[in-house]
């Protein structure tokens, strides 16, 4: 995720989502203090002989108890089990949410980069066609039938088309994950991993009912205006290969790539409406970003700019293995590698190294 915050800062993307880290940290601390205070209160009232620190230091060693006995020691052991489970559930909640947040930002950055690369490739394709028309004078050599697209298969067009399917699938996954994150934040126990279940109620259960009214309204609006039809494009991309068959040059030597007129299941595939794929993907990216931002704004979550080393998983899965002077990560910024190292325990410093590979070039060799 390290490289991509540069793009997000430049485009002002997902700032409010990044602000969730601070918001969740506050919620975690409030829940943690509540458990701690209850343990201390029980200790003061004589229900527990152990202090909060004693309970915390038990780690996974639980004193045994018998559900059928009512002696004081047994009752205390029941309380210890209860509080240890409360602390474990809180820690699991925090770890799962942090994992979801990192996954969401990573996949949203992939989504952005797919779209960004498609825009660059679109310009390259136009430049190549301009060369064919103006320099090679290709219009003198061939004609293209009117109201028809002929195959125009080059390295650039093949690369352009290859980004469409990953975009459809990434946004589909992000829609699902965002509502899962919301459910965990708002304490919705009926969470599901499918956006359609939330919006259509999956016949019996309206998963959105436990959310605030404004979130329900924003989600249904996003579903009706964008998500419903978009997810159908992803579905036919998975189940019906010919979603991406309509691309090529028209009679004016202009490159087009179209999505089907009606992506609904079992509808005949046609391209009469000439739905430009790049326009649609840009609109869907913007709509999803704005939907996320509006919902987080309704929860009073402040936007936060991305900074180097601000991610919860910056030290990987085993932070304890890093010592003073160790390099934690490296990421490219233009023609340099920025190396995140540890000056002291958990105090990062940055070293820059020349890295003159700021573009990707593809070569085919026979």
Image (cartoon, rainbow, N blue to C red):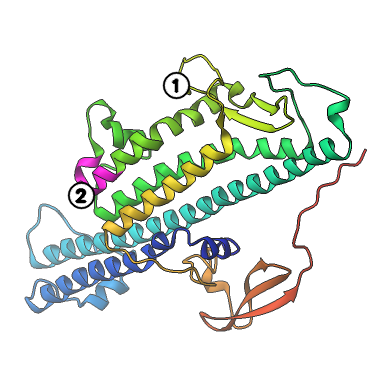
Asked if the residue under mark 2 is in contact with the one under mark 1, i.e. CB atoms within 8 Å, the reply is no
Please tell me the numbered disc located at residue 350: none
Please tell me whether residue 257 is drawn above or below residue 290 in the rendered image: above
Q: Which element type, helix, strand or loop, lies under badge 2?
A: loop
Relative to 266, 157 lies left or right: right
User: Depth check: 234 or 347 in front?
Assistant: 234
User: Does residue 173 lie above or below 355 as drawn?
Assistant: above
Which quadrant does the N terminus fall into?
A: bottom right
Residue interval drawn in magenta: 208-218
- Front: mark 1 or 2: 1
Q: Which mark is residue 264?
A: 1
Q: Is residue 92 left or right of residue 45?
A: right
Q: Residue at x 63, y 78 (%)?
A: 326
Where is mark 2, residue-wise?
A: 212
Q: Secondary structure at mark 1?
A: loop
Gap between marks 1 and 2, in whole Å? 31 Å
User: Which residue corresponds to the image point at 31% horizontal and 61% vertical from the top-left?
Assistant: 88
- Residue 194, image x, y percentages: 37, 37
Name the residue located 41 percent from the left edge and 68 percent from the top edge.
Answer: 304
Could you say where residue 19 lies in the image, as x and y percent from the top left? 38, 65
Where residue 56 sits, quadrant-wise, is bottom left
Q: Name which of mark 1 and mark 2 comes first in the sequence.
A: 2
- Badge 2 crowding class, 10 Å Cα cut-off, few under 14, some 14 to 19, many 20 or more, is few
Q: Quadrant of the C terminus?
A: top right
Q: Residues within 10 Å of mark 1 (few under 14, many from 20)?
A: some
- Residue appearing at x 87%, y 33% in the figure: 137
Residue 166 horizontal/vertical position (percent): 58, 39
Q: Is residue 259 magenta?
A: no
| Residue 70 in sight from this viewpoint | yes
């Amino acid at each position: 995720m390290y490289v991509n915050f540069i793009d997000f800062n430049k485009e002002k993307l997902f700032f409010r989502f990044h602000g969730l880290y601070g918001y969740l940290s506050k919620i975690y601390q409030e829940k943690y203090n509540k458990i701690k205070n209850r343990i201390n209160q029980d200790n003061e009232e004589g229900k527990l002989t152990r202090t909060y620190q004693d309970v915390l230091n038990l780690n996974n060693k639980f004193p045994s108890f018998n559900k059928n006995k009512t002696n004081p020691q047994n009752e205390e052991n029941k309380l210890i089990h209860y509080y240890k489970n409360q602390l474990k559930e809180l820690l699991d909640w925090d770890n799962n949410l942090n994992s979801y947040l990192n996954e969401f930002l990573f996949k949203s950055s992939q989504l952005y980069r797919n779209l960004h690369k498609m825009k660059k490739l679109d310009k390259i394709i136009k430049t190549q066609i301009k060369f064919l028309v103006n320099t090679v004078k290709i219009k003198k050599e061939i004609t293209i039938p009117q109201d028809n697209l002929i195959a125009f298969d080059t390295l650039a067009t093949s690369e352009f088309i290859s980004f469409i399917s990953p975009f459809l699938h990434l946004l589909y996954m992000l829609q699902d994950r965002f509502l899962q994150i919301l459910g965990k934040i708002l304490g919705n126990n009926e969470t599901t991993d499918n956006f359609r279940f939330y919006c259509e109620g999956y016949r019996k259960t309206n998963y959105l009912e436990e959310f605030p009214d404004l979130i329900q309204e924003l989600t249904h609006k996003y579903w009706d205006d964008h998500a419903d039809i978009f997810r159908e494009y992803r579905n036919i991309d998975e189940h019906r290969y010919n979603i991406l068959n309509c691309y090529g040059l028209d009679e004016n030597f202009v490159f087009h790539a179209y999505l089907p007129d009606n992506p609904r299941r079992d509808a005949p595939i046609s391209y009469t409406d000439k739905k430009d794929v790049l326009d649609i993907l840009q609109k869907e990216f913007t709509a999803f970003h704005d939907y996320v931002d509006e919902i987080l704004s309704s929860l009073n979550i402040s936007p936060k700019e991305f900074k180097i080393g601000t991610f919860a998983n910056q030290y990987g899965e085993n932070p304890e293995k890093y010592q003073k002077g160790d390099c934690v990560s490296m990421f490219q910024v233009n023609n340099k590698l920025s190396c995140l190292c540890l000056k002291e325990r958990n105090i990062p410093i940055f070293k820059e190294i020349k890295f003159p590979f700021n573009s990707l070039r593809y070569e085919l060799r026979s």
